[in-house]
Amino acid sequence: MSTDNRLEGGLVDRSSSVRFSFDGASYTGFKGDTLASALLANGVRLMGRSFKYHRPRGPLTAGPEEPNALVELRGKNRREPNTRATTVELFDGLEADSQNRWPSLKFDALAINDLMPSLFAAGFYYKTFMWPKAFWEKLYEPLIRRAAGLGSLSGEPDPDVYDKGFLHCDMLVIGSGPAGLAAALAGGRAGARVILAEEDFIVGGRLNAESFSVDDKPGHEWARSVFDELSSMANVRILTRTAVIGAFDHGVYGALERLTDHLATAEPGKPRQVLWRIYAKRTVLCAGATERPIAFPNNDRPGIMLSGAIRSYVNRFATTPGKKVAIFTNNDDGLRTVTDLKAKGVEIAAVIDTRTDGPSIDNVTHFQGARVVDTKGRYGLQEITVEQANGKTCRIDCLALGVSGGWNPNVHLTCHQRGRPVWDESLAAFLPHGVPEGMQVAGAANGELSTAAAFATGARTAGEALEDLGFKATGGKLPQSEDDPVNISPFWYVEGKGRAWVDLQNDVTVKDIKLAHQEGYRSVEHLKRYTTLGMATDQGKTANITGLAVMAEATGKSIPETGTTIFRPPYSPVAIGAFAGRHRDMSFRPVRKTPSHKWAEEQGAVFVEAGQWLRAQWYPQSGETHWRESVDREVLATRKSVGICDVTTLGKIDIQGADATRFVNAVYCNAFAKLPVNKVRYGLMLREDGMVMDDGTTARLAEDHYVMTTTTANAGPVFRHLEFCRQCLWPELDVQLISTTEAWAQFAVAGPNSRGLLRKIVDRDFDLSNDAFPFMGCAEVTVCGGLRARLFRISFSGELAYEIAVPTRYGDALVRALMKAGEEFDVTPYGTEALGVMRIEKGHVTGNELNGTITALNLGMERMVSSKKDSIGTVLSRREGMNHGDALKLVGLRPVDASQAFAAGSHFMKRGDEASAANDQGYMTSVCFSPNLGHAIGLGFLKDGANRIGEVVRAVNPLQKQETEVEVVSPHFIDPEGERLRG
Amino acid sequence: MRYSGFRVIKEALTGHKGWKPAWREPDPQPEYDYVIIGGGGHGLATAYYLAKEFGQKRIAVLEKGWIGGGNVGRNTTIIRSNYLLDGNEPFYEFSLKLWEGLEQDFNFNAMVSQRGIVNLFHTDGQRDAYVRRGNVMLLNGADAEYLSPEQLKSELPFLNFDNARFPIKGGLAQRRGGTVRHDAVAWGYARGADQHGVDIIQNCEVTGIRRQDGRITGVDTSRGFIGAKKIGCAVAGNSGRLMAMVDKRLPIESHVLQAFVSEGLKPVLPNVVTFGAGHFYISQSDKGGLVFGGDIDGYNSYAQRGNLPVVEDVCESGMAIMPMIGRARLLRMWGGVMDMSMDGSPIIDRTDIYGLYFNGGWCYGGFKATPASGWCFAHLLARDEPHATATAYRFDRFRKGLMIDEKGAGAQPNLH
Amino acid sequence: MIIEHPLLGPRDAQEFTCLGDASLINRPDWQEDDAVNRFYEYLYLRDNPAGEHRELWYHEQGDRSWLVVTRNTVTHEILRVELAIDVARTARSKDRT
């Protein structure tokens, strides 16, 4: 392959040659090249296909605004679709493939669409494919889907690591062109903490792409020297390969740093990218400007690119897109390309200036008041047709065409908080307006398009920000550089027969925009949505303004009257993996382990997620092949002798203060005012709307000291709620709260032998007898010879049971001690499944029942709700809709045929009723197999259930194709009188 | 003018000269029988059905900006009827049935794509809740399917089955759920309404609601006074602002919900998937973009933009459940103003001012409701009684304790 | 967003949980005749302004303070931050006088 397009000079490292492949063919480039520049140097202009018509395309730009040259980079599970060849740093061994083509880039079957462009005009799909109805999903849509889309994902998990980080600074400078470097220098020299973020892999911005000098040095050398000075400052952090992607509230910026994308292989474990959250007191936006094209018939061929992009390729990357280049411009800046190409010895085919009064150029075919009206060259530009001022046309051979329609300030980040740019007639461009608080804009981004003006405004803007922050700006001499005025005569598109592309990637043409207007889609937002203008991966960076101008002309209004286009984050597309960082797979959320976790692992426990907690679900023993065997054994053994379960995950809230009693009494709906010291009581907590929020037990350890427990799931929300009550509702109460969930390891010791076991653990001076320490007693005790502990005689299982708590660091030792002490009783550890079985057998409710729509009445606890005191939720629990006679009531259910099973989530129907929503009688909330009763049991809510004990209803479960006749029974299946727990 | 494949070909051959504006740009008349405030999906659908199904005339839709610019123009395009509670499920199933015939009805291809929706669950408790929900759906005549982990593995092999913090224990599928090209819904209704004589008046902001003797007489707008016999308010996130004009406070707060779309990709995701151990839902559009979202930011906002923590949270959930999307790039994010109600369910009701009707409180689930919301609101406006599927959506349900709280989160809008 | 915590200085809003309208501080008297109606209005009805809004934020990942944040819901600008307990005390003492 020819490498004749490589020129002298440039910023590529010729000592470091790099091999790479594109669509399987091998090429060589240099370090410092981008994939696009290296391909151009190798004479490759065709790099992609467009979205709709699958037109052959080459790069339009030399930067992040690229619409055409999109490739799939790397292979296998690292495949990266839609990667802009114009920003990919070349590395040795780089592999890239073209996309959205079949079977090959050159011969793309779907280019057939290009033969019928009229059929595929804007919005055509809204008007057809409706008949016959079934064909949309079976035929039309699959075809459209396959044709649409660009690159493809690998379908494999992303193997790379991403990180997140936080940075703070006095001044964030975004962009390192002349304005950004001047601003960063001012900040750095003043001693402020400065972050300079640059998307490119070298600093300098357009200074690297232009040929003019700064202070008698080439621009890029000046930039390099400033980089060296800034690098030496401890208070300045330079982030290259870092795009600031969004401006969020209160000076928070998102930035993406690419750490390893330019490497063939990264060190293992090194993050691919880092998402920085930057907290900036002030921000100077120096994001430069983006050149825009002029639309003209067949303006999309490979070789047709932005005039400034050609300068980037020529000056920075030492390559030309072709040996013979023409220039089409409406402004003076476009003419600079002529000078630069000539300086490198590239032949100028012609210069076409839309203006009649532009500067004249010697020794070049120069048409003034002229326009390009057509082009030729299927896979790359071969010829252009020029219509001259006198109306005559002529054809000109050329391999590349540089187009300049003027420059658009990069206002993107100024729009992220809904700022709306305003139109500037003299620049024919939108300028920032309503910028985010704390942000100032300098240089080309603010419409200061000359290098000298960029230096001046960058330094001045930074100086103002620094002064506001209390730094003394040092001033100093500004670098000298070109200060050419902007001479532009707005010119947007050339009328003609052929299609003139505005949005190249999405194939939106001038005609499409006019059609949108004809059909009434006239607001900018309708235009975008109807034609897809600006919705491609380049976010319309080169297309939006031209599209707006075409619409303005169609409506007969000015551009500002027609509207403006704003930009949303991110400024450039960001890998979803980077936003996720390390929070994926097993690290998605933190893992909380109970104090007995290590011990349980040693026992071979199976664990289950309970929110962020991992809890032992059951403890399989050898020979057990099904989980039910383990669970049944644990239940039976506990009810027969004694079992132990880690219940640390239940929320624990320590409540202290002179008004602690008043407080507890006000947050529970049942009476707590007279709970004696050393007693525990069941508490039902309502939300203010009268629904049950949570339940638990609260122990009174002293006159002014309570310990409340919550369900595992509600530990956080209940604590938040109590703090709300304390701080916002009753600030006068003398009460303090601490969450002590993690401070205490707590174990349930349940079963007839629990007292016997605990006698071996609790120090002897404490009397465990039923008289001395009856049901619902609590005490501060010592265990194992002096370790402080809390003992509660409470029971979730319905057995004689205790919960014993020690400081968390002794939890592991305590479980081992309990198991050791229990050996003589054949003590059994039990997990959450057995816990669940026993609580259903006992008729205790939990999360399945307390689903946020349940009242005390539904639970049959309405008599607990005290009307004699002010407590949260009692007033609104009296509303009529929550107290009608037909209300759901908690009941127990058992199968009429004991061999039959049923499932939670079933609905109740009367016998003989059709299974339908109209006949719904309620639903099953919890189901288990009761090894004590030998059949399935369930809890559920049944309309007027308390009065229907003994009735047989059907539990229907059409989802799982199940239906069972069940008898309505009391929810207390085991020991309804509560004799065991009082024993 | 009817749209058809034949017409597309004919116009293609004749230079597209025959296409007419999809809707007129009329000047407001001095008075209408019905003024619908809000040219979003719900407002346009209301006008369309008022004219087409209820035979009403002299109808105007007033839009302060451009039609379809609110939440119908910025959402994650999902349609489904997988609701749990009596007050909701029949309504959303009615809506899904309307979606199924919508395009033929209004002669506009809105790309209703019943690609199916799968809700994943990760704990036994979630499974039980989904079984209850699936049964409610079936008992109401909707479709629902229980999927085992093995079925999920064969249907959605790219989910994180092997290395997940919260293992996938199964899913609830609704095959008739799916996605719709959201903008086209607004345009289709607008065009259909226009063809039935409805005046769609854009850039017409309501600045006041006039009352006399306890009944409304019309609205003051940026284009002058417009008389009205009945006014229907369908302004989603701006409900509070509008009803403040008649000194009414609502059981509604306005919150920001962000949504996201990736770059275009070849087909990779066959249906809509929701994650049960975080807040995340995702589908792939016909253009190839992955369209996804999560929770609201959680604070009151009219700013139509959100902040980074939620962006990160959403992407974390996405990577947790579907780690193949790590290298897909997020292309655009945007925020909409959501009318979050106190129980997470909407209101379609009269107000205590004669002639003023209200439709709002859709939270961030209003898109799928668009057809039924329009139909039921039109029913209420035309006949002064609620449609059979929308009888529960009353203002007084909060006063009476008849909340329709799918999540069981209580009177806190940012939890719904 | 960044919330200027009266005790702890600037903190990322991510550390907080937002509850909503600060009028939730003004809980009605349970013994009034029309208590149900008053509680209904207190709990369910909102001003929901586009502009300045007083709202409750809880420093969940911090010192557990409830704050009253006055914030513009259109621009997100934060105008004032107070400890809710101070606001509540003031409100209660006004109630009593």
Image: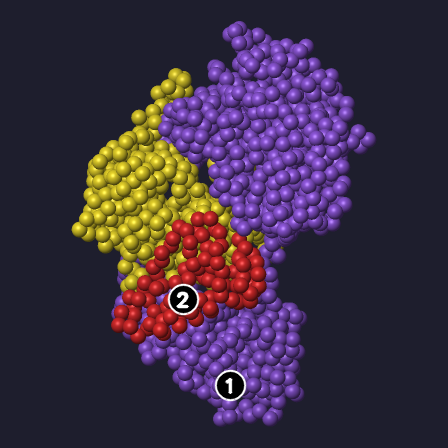
What chain is colored yellow?
B
Taking the spot 57% from the left edge, 35% from the top edge, the residue there is A446
Front residue of B150/B121: it is B121
Q: How far from the left and from the top, in percent, is residue A76?
A: 66, 40
| Same-chain status of marks 2 and 1 | no
Quarter of image, res A212:
top right
Q: Does any portion of residue B32 appear in the rendered image?
A: yes
Taking the spot 31% from the left edge, 42% from the top edge, the residue there is B206
Q: How far from the left and from the top, in percent, is residue A297?
A: 52, 17
Taking the spot 54% from the left edge, 86% from the top edge, the residue there is A779
Q: Is residue B95 above or below residue A62?
A: below
Q: Chain C is drawn in which colour?
A: red
Taking the spot 40% from the left edge, 23% from the top edge, the residue there is A556
What chain is colored purple?
A
Q: How far from the left and from the top, in percent, is residue B266?
A: 55, 36
Q: In this view, does A183 lie above or below A598?
A: above
What secondary structure is marked by label 1? strand
Q: Does any portion of residue B90 appear in the rendered image?
A: no
- Mark 2, residue position: C25
- Say which mark, if any, is on residue A838: none
